[in-house]
Amino acid sequence: MQFNDTICAISTAQGMGAIAVIRLSGAESFSICQSIFEPASKNKILADQKANTVHFGSIVNEETNIDEVLISIFKAPHSFTGEDIAEIACHGSPYIQQQILQLLIKKGARLATPGEFTQRAFLSGKMDLSQAEAVADLIASQSEAARRVALQQMRGGFSNELINLRAQLLNFITLIELELDFSEEDVEFADRSELSELVNNIESLINKLCQSFSLGNAIKNGIPVAIVGHTNAGKSTLLNTLLQEDRAIVSDIHGTTRDVIEDTINIEGITFRFIDTAGIRTTKDKIENLGIERTYSKIDKANIVLLMLDVNDPDEKIHEAITNVKSRLTEGQQQLIVVINKTDLLEDIVVENRFDQAAFRELNGIDSLVPISAKMQSNIDTLTSELLKTVNLTALDNDEVIVTNARHYEALSKSHEAILRVSDGLQTGLSGDLLSQDIREVLHFLGEITGHINTDEVLGNIFKNFCIGK
């Protein structure tokens, strides 16, 4: 695809820094730069220089020297956008950046819209839509896990899976529709048993991709961990200990925390979003009751629930608390970690005898139990290890495709529904024209993800969320 204009934007973050980069893309990139560039080597023409080279000189406005700069040259089609690209590295003064930007616009460039560089890369065929979205995810990544997932998708891991699926389905739909052309002769070009096997494999893979979204969404946005329990169990102390700062008010007075307090921490490349909640108890205080209602709401939305219990609580109170919280959890989707706090108040042998791991877990029907002292920061490393065990790090370590984008998940869910109809149709002997229609739906929704099928509305919504200059 050809574009008629040349765009420019500041690609580095706003504000003052040592260096700033101003990017141009389009057929006139080199000539526009040349019109304001005075190279250190006289008579140097940027358009005549080799691709992927850097050139030193000054940006001048008539006879005024604006700044000394380096200009990098990237030639079409071997560039990010597929067009000629020039990148001006200047000093990071906001004033200098704006002066150079205004000069470029004055010489014929247009200010780029949010995401327009990546959009041009997509429209030029340099990347598909899922890869373009991964660019934004990579820029926004705040943990090692998020970076790895975004980079894997940007390199085409997710796209390759979908392209392979579509290619196989396109082959069969061609044969099925060929049969329709010869319907009067009652011939069969598409082997139904082979198609059934293919459909089952595709259904399994799409289902696996759909299921990966819960992990992918958590990695991208932080895994929500609700810290719940009775009042004065040490929930706020634990939050402060994990964050290594006094984020929540700690007091011996019951009901101190009345609202939800949230903050994040990175543990071995995984972002956890901890939520300190109001203590659960019976009270007539209307404000505190509102906080308790929010506690139950956060339990419902959390991937992991840390149930904080006091080491001095009687067995009946502990068992009741565990039963109460377990009744609210969705099996297979939420993890419960029981944390016995204030172990510093008792001798180690007493704690070990009372909270024997195997016996306690079996009695209360739980998988994970961690005795700690949040105040003394004792055994916190064991707790963080238990948190990491709840994350499917195997999928990350094996570079498996993990869906992180809600738009992709929605399209995959719809394609899964359609492939199930294809499977049912094959089992019931559905006619070729109806099978073809369902297969086309699968192709449509898979194509929406990669951009093989798109609308201007979808494209506009995606790229408007990019930062300017990318």
Image (spheres, rainbow, N blue to C red):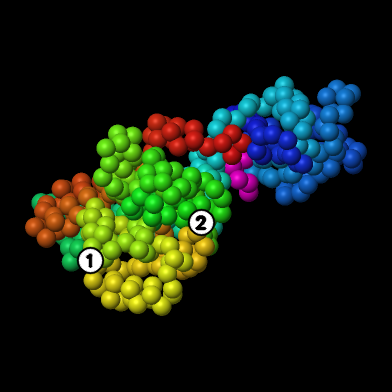
Residue at the image position 56 percent from the left and 30 percent from the top: 113
The C terminus lies in quadrant: top right
Residue under label 1: 197
The tag earlier along the polypeptide, 2 or 1, is 1
Residue at the image position 48 percent from the left and 45 percent from the top: 249
Q: Position of residue 345 (x, y in %)?
A: 44, 66
Q: From what the image shows, is residue 438 above or below residue 267?
A: above
Magenta-highlighted residues: 78-83
Q: From what the image shows, is residue 73 above or below residue 194?
A: above
Name the secondary structure under disc 1: helix
Residue at the image position 77 percent from the left and 41 percent from the top: 18
Q: Nearer the viewer, residue 94 or 38?
A: 94
Residue type at the position of mark 1: Glu
Name the secondary structure under disc 2: helix
Is residue 189 left or right of 25 when viewed as pictured? Answer: left
Residue 18 in view of the camera: yes
Residue under label 2: 242
Q: From what the image shows, is residue 99 above or below residue 316?
A: above
Place residue 428 in its image quadrant. Answer: bottom left
The magenta stretch spans residue 80: yes
Q: Position of residue 350 (x, y in %)?
A: 38, 75
Q: Nearer the viewer, mark 2 or mark 1?
A: 2
Q: Position of residue 339 (x, y in %)?
A: 38, 62
The magenta stretch spans residue 68: no
Residue at the image position 26 percent from the left and 65 percent from the top: 315
Residue type at the position of mark 2: Leu
